[in-house]
Image (cartoon, rainbow, N blue to C red):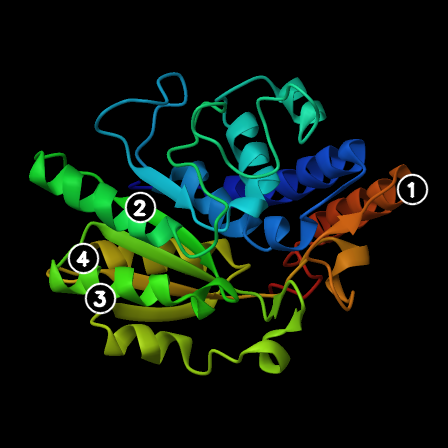
Amino acid sequence: MQNPNFEYMRRLSADIRVETVKAISKAGAGHIGGAVSIADVLAVLYGGAMNIRPSDPDWEHRDWLVLSKGHAGPGLYAALALTGYFPMDWLDTVNKPGTRLPSHCDMKRTPGIDMTTGSLGQGLSAAVGIALGNRINGIESYVYCIVGDGEINEGQIWEAAQTASHNKIDNLILFVDWNKKQLDGKLEDVNDPIDIAGKFEAFGFEAQTVKGYDVEEIYSAIERAKKVKGKPSVIVLDTLKGLGICFAENAVTCHFMAVDEKMEKEAIDVIEKRYEQGAYPGGESRK
């Protein structure tokens, strides 16, 4: 994208949070924490960084996104609906009987979902295979993958990382949602991953760490990653689980929460107030 529209991306990230909390409220409960902590990277990807055609989701030469942390599907569904992949009213059906938007991503049900995910640790393997396959077939596209910071406790992540490095898969850009929490609590209490960027560098990746809620930093990191040749890239997104959703930001565990209409309204009011103030999603001033 030659002239990125950062204001559009910021607005899109706010709208992704709004639509995510609305969808989970209608469902009664859901994986809100990890869905909204990736709202900003989704806004950058679908707001201009990816080469995509929403009217033709299966376009052969598109960029791909594998959401390895598939339980964050509601956030991705919001991004897809907001950018024209399917009607907005589909979001009212998230995780309900007969829905095309199940709790975890399913490529056979949802337009724009490039890979079925949900069994944590497996998505990066799929992304590596897709990127390698596209290269073999002469398709010049990027494959993006988002994994959770708790998810990288899975050994399969590192097997996939080693394979990506060995095959010099430079059309793969990985994001780690470093939001500091996983299902059972804080990372440091469950299984601290220590130096995430350093570990990926040891596996042969080009590594960057950026504010995971700053669309300009994320976009710039993607542009730098695209210039890397001969090895895969990882961008560690330094953020907080539940960021931008007031009732989730400081919850002991916000991995999966019940959400009612009162909580939904409060969250949307805060999202809009912070956006109007020109603040980052968590309320921190951008000036």
Q: What residue type is labelled 3?
A: Gln
Mark nearest the camera among 4 and 3 is 3
The residue under label 3 is 162
Mark closer to the chain start, 4 or 3: 3
Helix, strand or loop status at disc 2? helix
Helix, strand or loop status at disc 3? helix
Q: What residue type is labelled 4?
A: Lys
The residue under label 1 is 262
Helix, strand or loop status at disc 1? helix
| Residue 126 - label | 2
Q: Distance between the residues labelled 1 and 4?
A: 46 Å
Q: Are the residues tagged 4 and 2 within 8 Å (C-beta)? A: no
Q: Which residue lies at the image location 12% right of the left edge and 59% below the top edge?
A: 168
Within 10 angstroms of label 3, few (less than 14), some, or many (20 or more) residues?
A: some
Q: How far apart are marks 4 and 2 (CA)?
A: 23 Å
Q: Which residue lies at the image location 20% right of the left edge and 59% below the top edge?
A: 164
| Residue 227 - label | 4
Occupied quadrant, residue 139: top left
Choose between 181 and 233: the one closer to the eye. 181
Helix, strand or loop status at disc 4? loop
**Residue 186 image offset from top left, x and y in percent:** 65, 74
